[in-house]
């Protein structure tokens, strides 16, 4: 089976990875992390979220962070934007890509935002239109695409329904996210192939959590069916809030190590990412959750 020659890694550590940290991380540390990641060669970095500080206090410094980073030419800096108030702040901060989101699970949608999936995505319509009017990229993210902490199994038809809705809003890219990390390769391939019937597979991405240790297997399974965009988080930042003590996002270093072994081009320098992972882990006073990152650091004798 032919695997893609090239893969785009969307680095989500600065936003998705850090947003659930309990201790406030200074803007200067976030800026340093993003600058290190920018130098590593990522084409896309999820840098901020323009959400209510009441709900996500860690993202309260997003405007300061966006103003302070040393932008690298050709890098797309993304931000999560839930409403028009957030969009105004994101536009002023100079984001390149707006990220909107919906769940494939009705139970998750009702429990989290007290409305149906259809209503939640409809709320994003003005944000999507404003992004397009201002020449920004628009990305849609589908959470709980492979399972839900409340309802369990999520039908594939529910995922494709949200893909269609996001496509109609004009999304340039759509993320299939395994929010609780329950997906396994066969199911992942079935979901990706069904999504690809509604939206170009070249613009579909896999966002896998490693809660059950399946993320790398799920990435390989996605590569086999033609997916070539994946999300990953430096040092494995970001826990899974629905499974106590579980890891969250797959570690970028581990993904890069896998892709290097498959001779798939990413344009990203693994050593620079390992250094960035060790930098942020030192600041957080804990060991990085990346096996490849920790192994390569130990090999250097920097333990």
Image: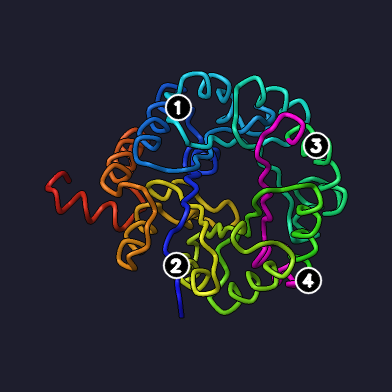
Give the residue at x 68% y 42%: 138
Q: What residue sits right under mark 2 in the picture?
A: 213
Q: For the residues marked 4 and 1, what is the alpha-carbon distance in whole angstroms?
A: 40 Å
Cβ atoms at labels 2 and 4 below 8 Å apart: no
How far apart are the two marked residues, 1 and 2, measured between alpha carbons?
34 Å
Q: Nearer the viewer, residue 287 or 86?
A: 86
Foreground label between 4 and 1 = 1
Horizontal relation, residue 45 to residue 262: left or right? right
Helix, strand or loop at label 2? It is: loop
First along the sequence among labels 1 and 2: 1
Q: Are marks 1 and 2 in contact (CB under 8 Å)?
A: no
Q: Is residue 82 above or below residue 85?
A: below
Residue in view at x 60 percent, y 22 percent = 93
Magenta residues, as a range? 132-156
x, y percent for residue 86: 71, 28
- Tell me which numbered mark, 4 or 1, is placed earlier along the sequence: 1
Spot the residue most to the left.
301
Graded by Cα atoms within 10 Å as few (under 14), some (14 to 19) or many (20 or more), the crowding at tag 3 reads: some
- For discs 2 and 4, the disc positioned in front in the rendered view: 4
């Amino acid at each position: 089976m032919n695997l893609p020659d090239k893969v785009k890694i969307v680095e989500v550590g600065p936003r998705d990875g850090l947003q659930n940290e309990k201790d406030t991380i200074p803007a200067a540390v976030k800026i340093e992390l993003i600058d290190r990641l920018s130098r590593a060669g990522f084409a896309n970095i999820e840098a901020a979220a323009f959400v209510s500080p009441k709900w996500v206090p860690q993202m309260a410094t997003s405007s300061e962070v966006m103003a302070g980073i040393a932008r690298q030419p050709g890098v797309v800096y993304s931000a999560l934007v839930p409403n028009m108030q957030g969009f105004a702040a994101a536009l002023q901060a100079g984001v390149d890509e707006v990220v909107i989101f919906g769940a494939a699970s009705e139970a998750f949608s009702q429990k989290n935002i007290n409305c149906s999936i259809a209503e939640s995505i409809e709320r994003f319509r003005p944000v999507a239109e404003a992004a397009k009017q201002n020449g920004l990229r628009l990305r849609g993210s589908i959470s709980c695409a492979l399972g839900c902490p409340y309802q369990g199994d999520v039908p594939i038809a529910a995922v494709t329904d949200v893909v269609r809705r996001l496509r109609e809003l004009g999304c340039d890219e759509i993320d299939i996210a395994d929010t609780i990390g329950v997906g396994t390769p066969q199911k992942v391939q079935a979901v990706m192939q069904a999504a690809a019937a509604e939206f170009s597979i070249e613009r579909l991405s896999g966002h896998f959590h490693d809660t059950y240790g399946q993320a790398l297997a799920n990435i390989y399974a996605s590569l086999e069916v033609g997916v070539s965009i994946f999300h990953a988080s430096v040092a494995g930042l970001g826990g899974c809030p629905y499974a106590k003590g579980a890891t969250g996002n797959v570690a970028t270093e581990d993904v890069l190590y896998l892709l290097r072994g498959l001779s798939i081009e990413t344009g990203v320098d693994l050593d620079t990412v390992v250094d960035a992972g060790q930098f942020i882990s030192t600041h957080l006073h804990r060991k990085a959750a990346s096996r490849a990152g920790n192994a390569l650091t130990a090999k250097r004798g920097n333990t």
